[in-house]
Amino acid sequence: MAGPPRRARRRLALPLLCLLLQAATAVLFAVFVRYDREADAALWPRGNHSSAHNEFYFRYPSFQDVHTMVFLGFGFLMAFLQRYGFSSVGFTFLLAAFALQWSTLTQGFLHAFHGGHIHVGVESMINADFCAGAVLISFGAVLGKTGPAQLLLMALLEVALFGINEFVLLSLLGVKDAGGSMTIHTFGAYFGLVLSRVLYRPELEKRKHLQGSIYHSDLFAMIGTIFLWIFWPSFNSAPTPLGDGQHRTVLNTYYSLTASTLSTFALSALIGRDGRLDMVHVQNAALAGGVVVGTASEMMLTPFGALAAGFLAGTVSTLGYKFFTPILESKFKVQDTCGVHNLHGMPGVLGALVGVLVAGLATHEAYGDGLPSVFPLMAAGPRTATSQAMYQLLGLLVTLTLASVGGAVGGCMLKLPFLDAPPDSQCYEDRVYWEVPGEHEDEAQGPLKEEELDTQA
Amino acid sequence: MAGPPRRARRRLALPLLCLLLQAATAVLFAVFVRYDREADAALWPRGNHSSAHNEFYFRYPSFQDVHTMVFLGFGFLMAFLQRYGFSSVGFTFLLAAFALQWSTLTQGFLHAFHGGHIHVGVESMINADFCAGAVLISFGAVLGKTGPAQLLLMALLEVALFGINEFVLLSLLGVKDAGGSMTIHTFGAYFGLVLSRVLYRPELEKRKHLQGSIYHSDLFAMIGTIFLWIFWPSFNSAPTPLGDGQHRTVLNTYYSLTASTLSTFALSALIGRDGRLDMVHVQNAALAGGVVVGTASEMMLTPFGALAAGFLAGTVSTLGYKFFTPILESKFKVQDTCGVHNLHGMPGVLGALVGVLVAGLATHEAYGDGLPSVFPLMAAGPRTATSQAMYQLLGLLVTLTLASVGGAVGGCMLKLPFLDAPPDSQCYEDRVYWEVPGEHEDEAQGPLKEEELDTQA
Amino acid sequence: MAGPPRRARRRLALPLLCLLLQAATAVLFAVFVRYDREADAALWPRGNHSSAHNEFYFRYPSFQDVHTMVFLGFGFLMAFLQRYGFSSVGFTFLLAAFALQWSTLTQGFLHAFHGGHIHVGVESMINADFCAGAVLISFGAVLGKTGPAQLLLMALLEVALFGINEFVLLSLLGVKDAGGSMTIHTFGAYFGLVLSRVLYRPELEKRKHLQGSIYHSDLFAMIGTIFLWIFWPSFNSAPTPLGDGQHRTVLNTYYSLTASTLSTFALSALIGRDGRLDMVHVQNAALAGGVVVGTASEMMLTPFGALAAGFLAGTVSTLGYKFFTPILESKFKVQDTCGVHNLHGMPGVLGALVGVLVAGLATHEAYGDGLPSVFPLMAAGPRTATSQAMYQLLGLLVTLTLASVGGAVGGCMLKLPFLDAPPDSQCYEDRVYWEVPGEHEDEAQGPLKEEELDTQA
């Protein structure tokens, strides 16, 4: 009674992987995960504190903004593809949900393991959402060319490597990277790009018409863009120390984004056909101002510095879409569906370098009593501004290395046959994985034909 | 000069009801409603407190999330119907706006009436929004089959009964139900389902084609889903005690939702045609994890417990859409447009039972000094864990009873002839109540024909 | 090798203006803008304060709501036009980003200039967003009839005048207007309307069919409406004093909006063809309750007063769309694309008058110890309630005068030939400024023909 091979595989690959992963994380949660001191009824120190002093209250609003960016922002930003909206939004949901559980464990073992347990609270939630963000950046590079089972496996690997990279940078090297120019954007982008290189499909050229948007799918994507834009100040500031640090991070990110928006419009019109603007630039490059201050926004970047960084990022990103993405595909055989190299890759590297620069220029005078909170190793003595800058640079190199190696390994894993990759002829199409109604009431997209289902079996 | 009967009724039913209800609540507001101590310029105790200690600041961000869920989340979740988007979003707006005013009064008389006045502040706003949520759940059951005047009358009754049920559970029985598994989800779902049963329309079978979505209406619905998903931790924690209680509730809800998402994808693919996913499941069942911890998320459920509960809820909900909804209609004659039985009904009852279990397992050791805040009657002496569990169970039975009786009464009320119910031939169509432009510029949907307007007069 | 004149101008007008404005603000930022005391690492007073006392934490959640309203709310509210969604959302983005930078400077010089520097922090961010809101209101009046270079120039002028008007009202006249009934809504609306009058295009009548919505563009617009509606309490309360003031403002705005929603539905059905509702009313008039309490919501308006004001505003606004907008165009030659006169103009003036009334009724008894925070000049002695009311009225007159003069000057500026205004035949069309894909995959809207591009050269 078994169906043809490909259909049987389809029916089982995703469910089995979901159930297996969920069972595994549930067991690990049962053994290791506990509420932290501020969330546990028995441990919360009553009497000494008023409820108001629970750090939860100072971090939760930022967390909710980050959560919105991860699920809604990334999901809808990727919904620009005309026939891949269900997958963009749906797989974002699936991947992020899994990444939150799994990164609670991986980050917990590396950062918050004491007394035999991982302790969770608002800070671990923020970190888990950050890790999910990196996974979704990688998803953007392979969008339309991978199935959900493949993506879950990608997330399994990437979350683990993300945790290791973050641990090396923040804990071993003493690198500052609150908003994740390196740990999130650079890592997520190059992991995804190398992975996409390994999965290169020469035949996709023929499906170019499906890699574009239609009018209203661009408006859906703008919903994603706007939520990313407005909440990016919360993203960069979510994990920084309370007080002036978060306040400064918010200001720097806010101004950087305004500048990347202006440079994006300027450049887009300048290079556009007949001077016309391109929605792809507005949807993406306008956000580069958030990425580029991911490392330095916590530092004394100054409002002018934020404008300059943002302006540069918007410019580089817009030019990247126009001139570099085609080369990336034709010369380097990297198919980058969402242009994550332009929004996360280059601006991420640029952001790391801005961090190197601003750290190298740090003085005791400029930071005053705030130095221990921003550069603890400089305040405590062992490091000079220059050596901190060198460590920041080293952090970038470590990130690029780990991301590339990880992406290469991941790409090989995703070629495993039982993972139900979509055939070339069905890339960028929802209906290979979803029941899809038509755009009009009378034209529900029929089921795939038997032959289609069984090709590449 | 009077138009034909049905049109005259149409023109007057909704305006008269709106104006009448608004006049009545305004008079009651004038007589009874006052700012509470923290919102009144003369009563706010200056000097002793810094502004920072106004509880408002610790509850307002959660309130805004709840407000977003009620108006945007529920509204757009119901916009999946291809020709009923204006009504889904518009009537949500109308119903919720009325419910906020009316529940300020009903809940105020029951819970916050002292010195001859109802005192309003951020907590009453949260409670009013919760009540509006229950009304919108019921709206989901009758979506497409009721007019706005009927819906306002439904809200009038439901808000009153919601307040009574809540008062019985929370104040008389000492039941814990912060996130409303019982008071909101179970109550709203069964009130709506019984009401839908009373209004059963055997002829609707013929309009099955309009009960589905089209491609972009599913994307609009996903906007609703995602906002519900990301803000559900705020929903469940909004009314819990400040401090560890809110923090723990957020964590439990967060993890429960990740698990219901994974189980929804697993089950949806497993039972789908050719292993394909169904958007209806993702839009709805993935949220069941929020509903199922509505009672227990405040308790020491443990992160593992949250995963287990969420996994179960996603599974039950997905299977419900596939196997139980058709039976509900064919055998029980309950037409449940949005499947609220699967998202709110069964997960709500399940959530109440999880609450029974977790309350029954509560120990003084596990809660420590936090016991008085979670289970005050256990801390004060009169109750054991087992008796608290029994009261929780009793709360569920009271809720089911009141919801069913209320829904039956409501259904009879909504059959009153002057309420302008849509004829069978115009169910699931916006244009019976709205001026509707076409989907393309040249095809504005014409006005209904005279005959259509006057049928069923 | 130069293209035909109009195309060359197109290619250069927007980029040059963007780059010029960005360069100018960047220089001014470098010279004048510094972090304020709560955002600067060296100035933040450690030791005395816990981080929790940084005012940032009490204002940031409201700020984020305001930010969401400005970028998402206004942007999508204007996306109702069937072929102008890219421009509505995209130019909102561009204009608001520029306005944030520029108003940081103008408001900074007027309000926060000391020690030779402008100090920025969360309060200056809120003020900048408010100013951007006024610019977007004016944008609504000229939507579809102006190009991006024109709009940037409009913003340049309007931001400066906004700052001056606000300074005159708040600092010189001691007028209260926290939520900006006068400074934001009245100013933005009449500036835009007078500007639209100067730019009157008699030929636009022929393009009426493009000034309407299509089915799904109305749903996009509803996303904007709902975010404006749910976050309006944060908008009005964002700049009020911490404590009871913000709490009361939130409550008043919340109730006012519920009442304007009910009156909008009542009136819309009453005056609609066959008693049917009009989406334009719901999208706009339902929000008038937020505008009308912009001045008075901080005062002891009482919950009943909020309901009454909201009800009145919804009524006036709905009737305005039906009866006054056509006259405005035919008699006064003011083409008001979004009906900002109905949503911001009349409700703004009404809101100012409500403020006059409530200020005139203020007593020491009603405000108690809170009087200095709401009416400092009454508490300190020099003013009576009646004189405060007179100053409030004077504030309205100043606002109307400055807005009208400014709009007239702005209109003349926008007629400068190098600003690339759209020809009549291309108003309300994205494709004059954007690369536009089709609504279906096979019908990408072709480039404009040579003749079209060069007309009106």
Image (tube, coloured by chain):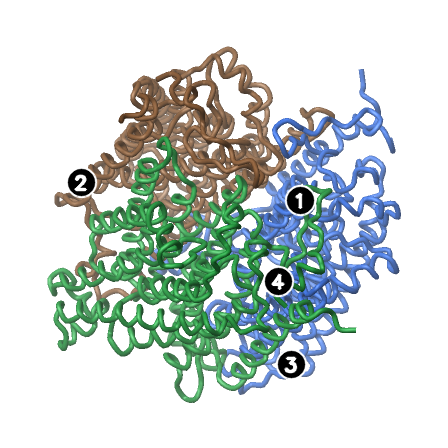
Chain colours: A brown, B green, C blue
The total number of labels drawn is 4
Residues at circles 4 and 2 in contact by the CB criterion of under 8 Å: no
User: Does dot 3 land on a helix, a strand or a loop?
Assistant: loop
State which chain disc 2 sits on.
A
Q: Where in the figure is residue C198, as x and y percent of width and height?
A: 85, 51
- Dot 1: within a 10 Å radius of its alpha carbon, few (fewer than 14), some, or many (20 or more) residues? many
State which chain disc 4 sits on.
C
Q: Where in the figure is residue C239, as x and y percent of width and height?
A: 55, 63
The amino acid marked with disc number 1 is Ser
In the image, is residue A349 above or below residue C253? above
- Dot 3: within a 10 Å radius of its alpha carbon, few (fewer than 14), some, or many (20 or more) residues? few
The amino acid marked with disc number 3 is Pro
- Is label 3 or label 1 in front? 1
- Residue C382: which disc? 3
- Residue A28: which disc? 2
Q: Which residue is mark 1?
A: C88
The amino acid marked with disc number 2 is Leu
State which chain disc 3 sits on.
C
State which chain disc 1 sits on.
C
In the image, is residue B177 above or below residue C69? below
The image quarter containing residue B163 is bottom left
Pick the front one: B154 or C450: B154
Q: Which residue is mark 4?
A: C287
Q: CA distance from mark 1 to mark 2?
A: 49 Å
- Dot 4: within a 10 Å radius of its alpha carbon, few (fewer than 14), some, or many (20 or more) residues? many
